[in-house]
Amino acid sequence: MEFTRWTIGPTLAAYLRELLRPGMRTLECGSGLSTRIFLDAGCDHIALEDDPKYRFEHPCVVVAPLIGKPPWYATWPRGPFDLILIDRPSAARGGRWGFLRAARDLIGPDTILILDDTQRKSDRELAGTIAKAFGMRKETIVPQHPKDFGRSATILHPGAARLARVREAEHRLRRILNVRPGYAKIDTFVETGTWLADTTLAACRLFRWVETIELSYDLYAAAKRKLANSQAILHFGDSAQIIPLIAKRLDRPVCWYLDAHWFIEQSPYGPPASESPFPLWKELEAIKLRRHADIVIVDDVHAFGRDSPGFEPWKTVSPSTISLALKPRVIASATLGDQFVCWLSDDGASR
């Protein structure tokens, strides 16, 4: 096969050959000359193709129609993958932003991701969005050969940002535990809103027992892989329904980390279906009924009291309304960075 305007260019092809190793699990969006490069490198390769007329003839190519807005393949394999190349869908078919719907299922902590055609503003912005969401480092591949036809590409490498986030979360939790010495020996941590599992991983370093709840299945599945070798117990479902069960089951002090409240502007995935997209008040109600010297941490103080689009439920959230929801259990409270923290009594005894 020859390089054309419809294939990856020679410069990107050279980079790709350097990155690939036999046995790597790889995924390609689109198929063609690049598919042959993956196969020649001995990769365990899958290629998704939305247009049968462009299909590269090989069993590794799966033809799948595009669905949704922005469009993405109707089916895709489970990740994570060692390397992913995004070269379709074409702009004429709706572009590549639909990848974000599958990103959590495909990208692992060591994934290398390549986006072709990032000379285009839309694809360049997509690369930036993915890099920010996954803490990846960007490398721009500029055209160096006439048959690159002026096209550039972006390689996203696994970065140190995620490790930094985990360490920062560990520092925050350790600081909170040490504010009041009587609470420093709490060995159980329960989190709502697993998200990227950074706080969960930090908690695994500080607590003997860790449980976390996530409503989005994509995030839950990704976190399950990340936490496979940890002591964390993952729950898939609505924290407004699960927290009351955990609160009754755990007959010991708990550090509660409440972060399941949804930001409409926070994620490209769209809010998950739920009867309680803002479960904070039901979570606090269940915790209040306990009789243990718990710590309650409510994340995202920066959003307290906001009434802008996407933040409507936050209008009534404040340190005073949270303390009132836990009354008369609160014996001390403080705002520490972006977390509001309440220390609770066990039947009123101060610590």
Image (tube, grey):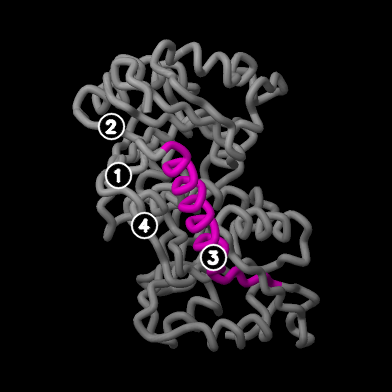
Q: Which residues are magenta?
A: 153-180
The residue depicted at 60 percent of the width and 56 percent of the height is 130
Type of amino acid at the residue the image marks with label 2: Pro
The disc label shown at residue 30, or none: 3
Residue nearest the viewer, comparing 26 with 278: 278
Q: Residue 316 placed where, x, y %?
A: 60, 14
The disc label shown at residue 226, or none: 4
Mark 3 and mark 4 lie on one chain; the one further toward the N terminus is 3
The disc label shown at residue 253, or none: 2
Type of amino acid at the residue the image marks with label 1: Val
Res. 73 visible in picture: no
Find residue 77 and report its image quarter.
bottom left
Asked if residue 336 is positioned above or below residue 149 in the image, the reply reads: above
Q: Residue 31 placed where, x, y %?
A: 52, 69
Distance Cα–Cα, label 3 vs label 4: 28 Å
- Judged left or right of residue 348, residue 312 is right
Type of amino acid at the residue the image marks with label 3: Gly
Distance Cα–Cα, label 4 vs label 2: 27 Å
Give the structural element (helix, strand or loop) at label 2. Answer: loop
